[in-house]
Image (cartoon, rainbow, N blue to C red):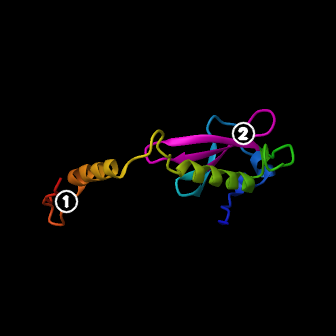
Amino acid sequence: MASSVRSNPLETRTNRLKLANRDTLYFVTVGEGLALGYQCTVKGNGTWQARLWTGDKYVKHTLSEADDFMEADGDNILTFFQAQGKATVYANEARKPELPKGKPVTLGAATTAYLAWYKEYRTSPSGHERKVCS
């Protein structure tokens, strides 16, 4: 299991309750392209969110409530370290490539698609295009 990131302002409920209420979340980076966010609320527990960089945009995902006023149960109410773990699981699942829907791809179709890509993107080390037989 990966080691946990430490963040003094978000780690304990005492420190989180000292944070100012604001519209933006308090974020801490917990992995490559992954941040854990905490949102203060006026009443009740704050919320944990995962923010994942997909290469062109951020995707936010609400994880659960924080353990500000209630004990963590590991599912609906999480500690800082439990939220980190849940954010990492979410990121790993979100980064998995989606399998194409519909009928399976044939070897001929895959080869044709690859050769088309190869003609368009592949160049020789000298920068001149290589001739590819069709």
Image coordinates for residue 37, horizontal then vertical, percent: 64, 46
Q: Amino acid at mark 1?
A: Thr
Mark 1 closeness class: few <14, some 14–19, many ≥20 residues within 10 Å = few
Q: Earlier in the sequence, mark 2 or mark 1?
A: 2
Q: Judging from the image, what secondary structure is the residue with disc 2 in? A: loop
Magenta: main secondary structure equals strand
Q: Is residue 33 above or below residue 125?
A: above
Range drawn in magenta: 36-65
Where is residue 70, by image quadrant? top right
Residue 50 counted in the magenta span: yes
Determine the residue positioned at 73% across, 42% down: 64
Question: Left or right: where does residue 107 sit relative to residue 91?
Answer: left
Determine the residue positioned at 16% across, 56% down: 133
Q: Judging from the image, what secondary structure is the residue with disc 1 in? A: loop
Question: Left or right: where does residue 17 sit relative to residue 99?
Answer: right
- In the image, which is nearer the foreground, mark 2 or mark 1? 1
Question: Left or right: where does residue 99 sit relative to residue 90?
Answer: left
Where is residue 122, by image quadrant? bottom left
Front residue of this view, candidates 72 and 40: 72
Question: Residue 14: which disc?
Answer: none
Front residue of this view, candidates 37 and 112: 112
Determine the residue positioned at 51% across, 43% down: 58
The residue where tag 1 is placed is 123
Image coordinates for residue 113, horizontal then vertical, percent: 30, 48
Residue 40 counted in the magenta span: yes
Q: Amino acid at mark 2?
A: Cys
Image coordinates for residue 59, horizontal then vertical, percent: 54, 41
The residue where tag 2 is placed is 40
Image coordinates for residue 20, horizontal then vertical, percent: 71, 40
Whole-number angstrom distance, CA of label 2 to CA of label 1: 53 Å
